[in-house]
Amino acid sequence: GQNIDQPTEMTATEGAIVQINCTYQTSGFNGLFWYQQHAGEAPTFLSYNVLDGLEEKGRFSSFLSRSKGYSYLLLKELQMKDSASYLCASPSGSARQLTFGSGTQLTVLP
Amino acid sequence: DTEVTQTPKHLVMGMTNKKSLKCEQHMGHRAMYWYKQKAKKPPELMFVYSYEKLSINESVPSRFSPECPNSSLLNLHLHALQPEDSALYLCASSQDTRQGYGYTFGSGTRLTVV
């Protein structure tokens, strides 16, 4: 399976921009997911990248560089409700099961 | 219908009880997954079903017994659980196990073992 690394915690201010990085092994790559998860709730799909480049979806954008084994999630105009854990994940293995990074706990301060 | 539905949302059970978690999807997905998630940890894979057949069991204790009655349903039967089994149990589905897209998670079942 994949080894996926992302920072454990980040803090940012309301209205600011934050970038959450994720690195992964490039062998056997099958795309990269970003999920948002609020405490006690299920993960919510944010994005899926399989090709290089930036995909923008409202305040959230996701970037992928397959050659570098690197992705980031960009959150603009941060709101308090964006405080959550952000999970980077990639399908791998015989059943394309999702392997997750440890998750980045984002705290948005007023 | 683009959802994965899990029931119940919350479950409290004793260590001698038998209970079942249910998961349903009507997207025509042929791969279904059970994940377990402890607080402040990422989800961990338990089982994978592909075309209604068990394809992966991640060395899960036998007190957890999965079942896939048909392509739309996935159950997880629970028996003689321990308090450390308390967690969020997530069901997911995807188009099939050959492709990496289309992953959809259910809202989860919050299980407490007392």
Image (tube, rainbow, N blue to C red):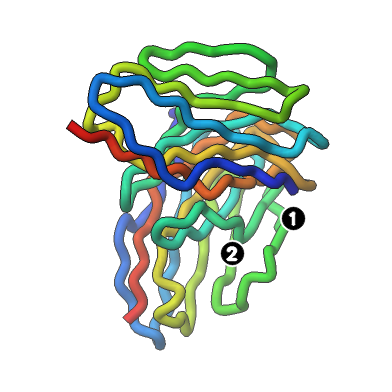
Residue linked to disc 2: B66
- Graded by Cα atoms within 10 Å as few (under 14), some (14 to 19) or many (20 or more), the crowding at tag 2 reads many
Q: Which mark is residue B55?
A: 1
Relative placement, left or right, of A77 versus A8 is: left
Which residue ends up furthest to the bottom in the rendered image?
B16
Residue A39 percent across, percent down from the top left: 32, 49
Circle 2: residue type: Pro
Task: Name which residue lies at 57% across and 45% down.
Answer: A101
Residue A102 percent across, percent down from the top left: 53, 49
- Indicate the secondary structure of the residue bearing disc 2: strand
Residue A70 percent across, percent down from the top left: 66, 28
Task: Name which residue lies at 58% across and 70% down.
Answer: B65
Subunit ID for the residue under disc 2 = B
Of the two numbered discs 1 and 2 on the same chain, state the one appearing first in sequence.
1
Q: Which mark is residue A50?
A: none
Which quarter of the figure is the N terminus of chain B placed in? top left
Subunit ID for the residue under disc 1 = B
Relative placement, left or right, of A6 versus B18 is: right
Residue A43 percent across, percent down from the top left: 43, 42
**Badges 1 and 2: C-beta atoms under 8 Å apart?**
no
Which residue ends up furthest to the right in the rendered image?
A27
The residue nearer to you, when weighing A86 against A17, is: A17
